[in-house]
Each structure stands twice: as structure tokens, then as C-alpha cells.
Amino acid sequence: MVDFDPAKGAEIEKPRSAVVISSDSVGVLPLKIVAPVTTWNESFKGKLWLVEIAPDANNGLTQLSVVDALQIRSADV
């Protein structure tokens, strides 16, 4: 879980599951680049910045979800 608070405006502002999209070799600070995961909603259909993730044993999700690529940010390790 990543705590996306504090937030401004329409940014996600609560703890969420997230996908880490940076490697250990990026930068010298103890930061990871992350994108939040949220539960699928029919209104998300056709929105190219929302990447669908099906639940499976590897990701631990229990329902269809999406990664929100517009909400990418750095998080302290």
C-alpha cells in the first residue's frame, strides 16, 4: 500500500495498492515511481490512461482493477 496523501485537487488522496514502475537502479534517493491501482468501473472503458489488470495469484487482486497512469508519482521507500 502507498499513502497518496497529501493530495491537491482531483489527485488520489488515500492509501491504495500501487504498481512500482521504477527499478532499483533509478536515482540515488530512496524513492520508487508508483502508479495507483483502483477497482474497475464501467465508466473507465475506452480511457487509454487506465490500464486494466485482471486478478491472479501473482498480483493478489480479488477483482478487475486498473492502474491510473495519470496519477504517477514518487513515493518514499
Image (cartoon, helix red, strand yellow):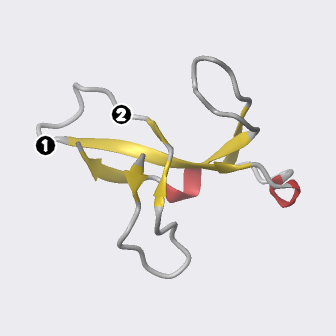
Q: Would residue 17 appear left or right of 4 to someone viewing this image?
A: right
- Tell me where residue 17 appears, x and y as whole percent: 50, 45
Would you say residue 49 is visible in this rendering?
no
Q: Residue furthest top?
A: 57
Q: CA distance from mark 2 to mark 1?
A: 12 Å
Residue 37 sits above or below residue 56 on the image = below
- Tell me where residue 33 appears, x and y as whole percent: 36, 43
- Tell me where residue 62 appears, x and y as whole percent: 70, 34
Residue visible at 52% across and 66% down in the picture: 12
Residue at disc 2, secondary structure = loop
Residue 60 sits above or below residue 77 on the image = above
Residue visible at 30% across and 51% down in the picture: 75
Residue 6 sits above or below residue 76 on the image = below
Label 2 or label 1, whichever comes before in sequence order: 2
Mark number displayed over residue 10: none
Residue position marked by numbered label 1 in the rendering: 29
Number of residues whose C-alpha sits closer than 10 Å to that of mark 2, classed few (under 14), some (14–19) or many (20 or more): few
Residue 54 sits above or below residue 57 on the image = below
- Tell me where residue 34 appears, x and y as whole percent: 42, 44
Mark number displayed over residue 22: 2
Give residue 26's quadrant in the image.
top left
Number of residues whose C-alpha sits closer than 10 Å to that of mark 1, classed few (under 14), some (14–19) or many (20 or more): few
**Residue type, label 2:** Ser
**Residue type, label 1:** Leu
Using the image as rendered, state which of residue 54 and residue 50 is in the foreground.
54
Q: Would residue 60 appear left or right of 14 to someone viewing this image?
A: right
Give residue 6's quadrant in the image.
bottom left
Would you say residue 11 is visible in this rendering?
yes
Residue visible at 41% across and 74% down in the picture: 7
Residue at disc 1, secondary structure = loop
Q: Residue furthest front?
A: 62
